[in-house]
Image (cartoon, rainbow, N blue to C red):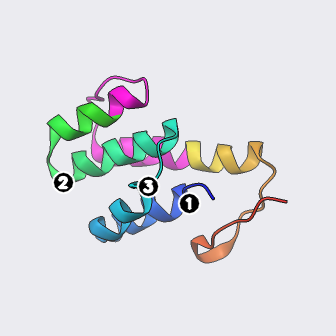
Amino acid sequence: MGCDYKKALELSKQGHWEEAHRLVQPHSDPLTCLIHAYLHRVEGDSGNASYWYTRAGEKLLKGTLDEEYERLYARAIKFEDDAGMPALKGGAMRTWR
């Protein structure tokens, strides 16, 4: 099963960095790598963030953390829409049919 992108982002926004980091660690798809990079920016570790941006095929962003959060959250929603996955309340895990 893939990463629950929205849940990882929401946990980070709520100040639960370690739990969000645990959610993204086992995954390596581009969006998860971007979220992983964002989490390391939140942590203040720009070197590690740069590594994860590179793994995602992007450069380290210069915008604010809030701007990055909004950009990533919009991508997470688009992923769900493109995959035909219904939005669930509370960040529940989705299952593939």
Left or right: 94 in relation to 50: right
Residue 84 is a magenta residue: no
What's the residue at 43%, 23% (across, down)? 57
Res 58 quadrant in image: top left
Please tell me which residue lies in front, 63 or 84.
84
Q: Disc 2 on helix, strand or loop?
A: helix
What's the residue at 29%, 46% (across, down)? 65
Q: Quadrant of the C terminus?
A: bottom right
Q: Residue furthest bottom?
A: 90
Q: Position of residue 72 (x, y in %)?
A: 48, 44
How many numbered discs, if any?
A: 3
Who comes first in sequence, dot 2 or dot 3?
3
What's the residue at 66%, 44% (across, down)? 79
Please tell me which residue lies in front, 69 or 48.
48
Q: Position of residue 7 (x, y in %)?
A: 50, 65
Q: Disc 3 on helix, strand or loop?
A: loop
The residue that disc 1 covers is 4
Q: Quadrant of the N terminus?
A: bottom right
Query: From the viewer's perspective, is residue 67 above or below residue 10?
Result: above
Q: Disc 1 on helix, strand or loop?
A: loop
Who comes first in sequence, dot 2 or dot 1?
1
The residue that disc 2 covers is 43
Res 75 quadrant in image: top right
Q: Which residue type does callout 3 highlight?
A: Pro
User: Of tags 2 and 3, which is closer to the observer?
Assistant: 3
Q: Which mark is residue 28?
A: none
The residue that disc 3 covers is 26
Query: From the viewer's perspective, is residue 29 above or below residue 14?
Result: above
Magenta region, residue range:
53-74
Label 2 to label 1: alpha-carbon separation: 20 Å
Q: Which residue type does callout 2 highlight?
A: Glu
